[in-house]
Image (cartoon, rainbow, N blue to C red):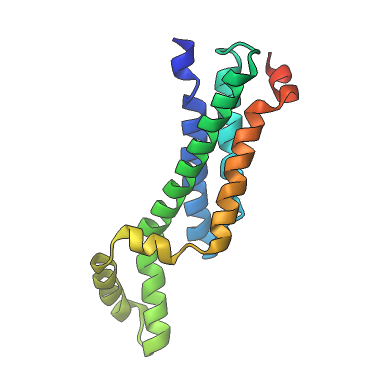
């Protein structure tokens, strides 16, 4: 039964990290890709915390699998953050861009922005909001999430 609970920490860390990232974008208006590394830290730490008591200290193969699971959850958390960013922030940012380009108020631009948002798929909007540097940050986040459960010193702290 404890082995079933082990991935829950990684899932929880990924979800919390994704929501916090989307909220950061909403609060600041900046898409800070480096926050993806924080998602990796939260995911790896969550997997380590829930797995440390339920899995044996050895063999290393078990912890490599935990690390792979943490990396997958980190990538999932990044996609959750990008999805929520589009859902929460895209219409307002499209409206702001329309109002600047066409010299109209935000109230006039909001219905047009909503129509434009409804015409595009969420995946298309996610792609337009991602750059190559985001892929690099995502790879670093996955590596960090993989490494945290595999660091023997961290596991010794929890045993």
Q: Considering the image in quadrants, where does the N terminus appear?
A: top left
The residue under the point 28% across, 66% down is 120
- Quadrant of residue 32 within the rendered picture: bottom right
Query: Extreme bottom residue here?
Result: 103
Nearer the observer, 103 or 137 = 137
Left or right for 116, reference 3: left
- Quadrant of residue 133 within the rendered picture: bottom right
Left or right for 47, reference 155: left
The residue under the point 42% across, 67% down is 128
x then y, percent, for residue 98: 37, 81
x then y, percent, for residue 147: 65, 34
x then y, percent, for residue 25: 51, 59
The residue under the point 56% across, 19% down is 51
Nearer the observer, 30 or 72 = 72
The answer to whether residue 74 of the structure is visible from this angle is yes
The residue under the point 46% across, 18% down is 5
Nearer the observer, 140 or 91 = 140
The answer to whether residue 41 of the structure is visible from this angle is no
Q: Considering the image in quadrants, where does the C terminus appear?
A: top right
Nearer the observer, 132 or 94 = 132
Left or right for 39, reference 103: right
Query: Extreme front residue here?
Result: 61
x then y, percent, for residue 153: 75, 23
């Amino acid at each position: 039964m404890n082995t079933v609970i082990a991935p829950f920490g990684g899932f929880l860390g990924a979800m919390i990290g994704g929501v916090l990232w989307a909220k950061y974008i909403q609060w600041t208006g900046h898409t800070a890709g480096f926050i993806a590394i924080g998602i990796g830290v939260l995911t790896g730490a969550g997997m380590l915390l829930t797995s440390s008591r339920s899995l044996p200290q050895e063999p290393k193969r078990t912890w490599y699998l935990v690390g792979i699971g943490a990396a997958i959850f980190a990538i999932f958390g990044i996609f959750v953050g990008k999805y929520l960013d589009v859902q929460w922030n895209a219409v307002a940012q499209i409206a702001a861009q329309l109002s600047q380009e066409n010299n109209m108020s935000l109230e006039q631009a909001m219905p047009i922005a909503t129509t434009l948002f409804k015409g595009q798929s969420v995946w298309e909007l996610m792609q337009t909001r991602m750059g190559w540097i985001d892929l690099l940050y995502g790879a670093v986040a996955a590596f960090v999430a993989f490494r945290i459960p595999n660091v023997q010193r961290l596991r010794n702290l929890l045993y």
